[in-house]
Amino acid sequence: MDIRSEVAVYVKLPNGFYISTPMGRYNPDWAIAFYEGMVKHIYFVAETKGSMRSMQLRDIEKAKIHCAKEHFKAISNGDVVYDVIDGYQALLDKVMR
């Protein structure tokens, strides 16, 4: 992301940043801000995975990810997008929608 012109800033979220879920605390991986006008969604919180095959995620992890999606939907009116991605192209595909 260092060389991408649409990325304003990105940060690895610290352990102190978490979402409370019925299954316990959940820590997303990254927060990314894009320059306005270059993408549709300006703020993005991401959970990165090496593979997008949902069968590889444990049930508790799937439930925490679901809770995080609902959390960001509820608190941001769509201004903050949360999703699971496996690479930069997947990230761009999400923020361009």
Image: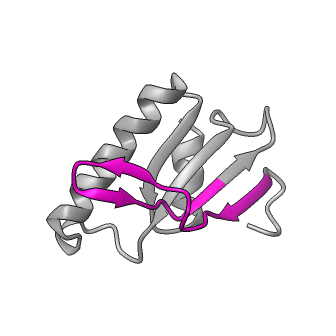
The residue furthest top is 77
Residue at the (51%, 46%) spot, across then down: 94
In which image quadrant can residue 61 be found?
bottom left
Percent coordinates x, y for residue 7 in the rendering? 77, 54
Decide if residue 19 is on the left or right side of residue 45: left
Q: Can you say whether 42 is above or below 19 in the image?
A: above
Question: How many badges with numbers are in the image?
Answer: 0
Decide if residue 97 is on the left or right side of residue 60: right
The colouring scheme, among rainbow, by chain, secondary structure or one colour, is one colour
Residue at the (77%, 39%) spot, across then down: 38
Percent coordinates x, y for residue 29 in the rendering? 52, 65
Q: Is residue 20 highlighted in magenta?
A: yes
Q: Is residue 37 highlighted in magenta?
A: no
Percent coordinates x, y for residue 40 in the rendering? 65, 33
Residue at the (79%, 56%) spot, across then down: 9
Decide if residue 11 is on the left or right side of residue 52: right
Range shown magenta: 8-31
In which image quadrant can residue 1 be found?
bottom right
Percent coordinates x, y for residue 89 in the rendering? 57, 61
